Amino acid sequence: MKVTIYGSGYVGLVTGALIADVGNDVLCVDVDETKVANLKKGIIPIFEPGLDDVIKRNVEAERLDFTTNMDDAVAHSEVQFIAVGTPPGEDGSADMQYVAAVAKTIADRMTESKIVVNKSTVPVGTGDMVETVIADGLAARNEKIPYAVISNPEFLKEGAAIEDFMKPDRIVIGTDDERATEVMRELYAPFCRNRRDRLIFMSRKSSELTKYAANSLLATKISFMNELSNIADRLGADIEDVRVGIGSDPRIGYHFIYPGCGYGGSCFPKDVKALIATSRENNYEAQLLQAVDSVNDRQKHVLFEKLMKHFDNDIKGKKFAVWGLSFKPNTDDLREAPSRVLIESIFEHGGTVRAYDPVAMNEMRHFYPDEKRLELVGTALDTTDGADALLINTEWREFRSLNMDVVKKSLNNPLIIDGRNLYEPETLEAAGFVYDCIGRPRDAA
């Protein structure tokens, strides 16, 4: 099957590469000529474990190609995926200009039937908008060409996207078009041969809402646990014991109930805000979602608040080691990352930072290209030499078993403030550290 994918960012690249990997002929489209030239050489603009190998393999097999030519893109296939960005506006609503632009591109060039698949995360009703843009474009050309617009949201976790795509929990498709249903069954058959019930068909609007509902519920679990961690801090309870206690209930489970310093990335913050905005546009105040968003914004300041308490609210001239910059492990994504809130707060109060992350260093340089108060170094242990405290933002695996004797000797103060609860407090305290983490006060019973 031939497939066209508009947008060569995270969703577009993963989708295109893995659809090609099962034998399809995929053309990925982007307006950035440099990005397309690099992709043709196997240079990808994101970090996702294993993705570079998949892209290289399929480019060499001539199943995957990249272009900036919109005429070629529209002509290439019946199935046209829209996987462009939907960045948040100032009010939190999703910006649909790039989705609309692709729809117009298709409408202006199509000469035969098309199935237009919304893969981008979009507000409920976007399918109707795309349908209207294409209808208007065809009318302007005095053309009557059949087409279908369907919703097919992605459910990919950064850092595990290949596994998620190849072995999906579910594939949600919003359409009532018989031809589109038949084509999507054929396209996704290789990914659900053992479990055909993974293909879930529903209305287009229900499919669009399903994506927002899933991410908002997961974000709610995270904010709920972070709220509880702040309560535990004040009550003398241990949030890790609480987590085990509630997670053992199968109705709750252990997924997404780890306390920390807030969620980030390209999905949860944007999608929660977008659903709040969509609700408001439809005369409904989504109070629970507003609280989820508010709790997360506040949680990103918790590490800095702890730091200031340890230094009597004065860190001017102090230097701090920071481990982990990306919003989660196995990605270089710094969008909405708690590390940036912490580091910028340190700057504002006169401190400096020496930081390390296994894969996000280049991204950090892009965010702070000329920042003299930020030093990026080659290893985690390089950060601590002469630092006044160590702060941990991201739970990278390599941080779990480092030589803490070396860390202690290199720090000016044996203080660790851990935003991901990587260590047992008793172990670090026995080694001579002052260890402050999330929801685990030392008078916890």
Image (cartoon, grey):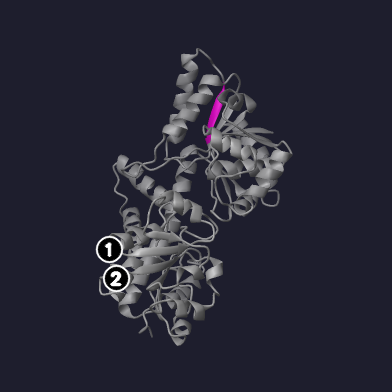
Element on which disc 1 rests: loop
Q: Which residue is identified by label 2? A: 308
Residue under label 1, please give it. 349
Identify which amino acid the numbered label 1 is placed on: His
Give above or below for 238 relative to 334: below
Image side of residue 231 versus residue 12, left or right: left
Residue type pointed to by label 2: Met
Q: Position of residue 62 (x, y in %)?
A: 72, 36
* Image location of residue 428, percent across then percent down: 46, 82
Q: Does residue 149 belong to the magenta stretch?
A: yes
Residue 119 x %, y %: 53, 40
Closer-to-camera residue (387/393): 387
Q: Please give the range of residues in magenta.
A: 146-150
Identify which residue is drawn at 58% across, 30% down: 115
Whole-number angstrom distance, CA of label 2 to CA of label 1 = 10 Å
- Callout 2 crowding tier (Cα within 10 Å): few <14, some 14–19, many ≥20: some
Please determine whether, in this image, residue 142 is positioned above or below residue 432: above
Which label sits in the foreground, 2 or 1? 1
| Residue in view at x 36 percent, y 59 percent | 373
Residue 207 seen in the current view? yes
Q: Nearer the viewer, residue 245 or 331?
A: 331
Label 1 Cα crowd, 10 Å radius (few <14 / some 14-19 / many 20+):
some
In magenta stretch: residue 436: no
Q: Predominant secondary structure in magenta? A: strand
Viewport quadrant of the N terminus:
top right
Q: Residue furthest bottom?
A: 430
Of the image marks 2 and 1, the number of the one nearer the N terminus? 2
